[in-house]
Image (spheres, rainbow, N blue to C red):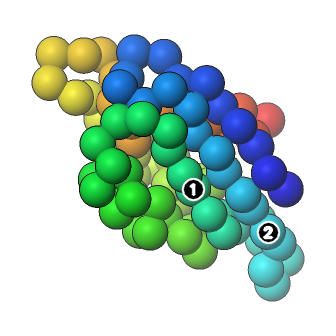
Amino acid sequence: MKYQYQTLGTCSKLIEIETVVENGKEVIKEVAFTGGCNGNLQGIGALVKGMTPEEVIKRLEGLKCGNKPTSCPDQLSKALKAIIK
C-alpha cells in the first residue's frame, strides 16, 4: 500500500510511505521525504526499510529537532500511527 502524510512543524513537507506484507506482517518497503535535510532523511528511509510500523514508532516517536516540538523522524512515527489505525 502507498500512503502520503502532510507533515507539521518540520522542514520536510510530505512523507510518502510504501508498505508490503511479508511473512504475514506489514513492513516498510520505501519511505521518501519531500523537503528537509536530504541526506539525513535518505538515511532514515534506508534504516527503516524492512521494519514494521510499530518498530519504527517505538524508536522515533517523540524525537525533537532543536527547539521545535517535533522532528522529521517524529513526523514519520505520526504518519505510521495514522496508517496502522
The image quarter in which residue 37 lies: top left
Outermost bottom residue: 23
Q: Secondary structure at mark 1?
A: strand
Total numbered labels: 2
Foreground of the two, 50 or 45: 45
Expressed as whole percent of the image width and height from the top left, the position of residue 17 reads: 66, 51
Q: CA distance from mark 2 to mark 1?
A: 12 Å
Q: Is residue 74 left or right of residue 2?
A: left
Residue located at (39% from left, 41% from top): 73
Instruction: Identify the residue under disc 2.
Output: 20
Foreground of the two, 83 or 10: 10
Q: Is residue 70 visible?
A: yes
The label number, if any, that marks residue 31 in the structure image: 1
Residue 15 to residue 48: above or below: above
Foreground of the two, 47 or 41: 41
Residue located at (16% from left, 16% from top): 67
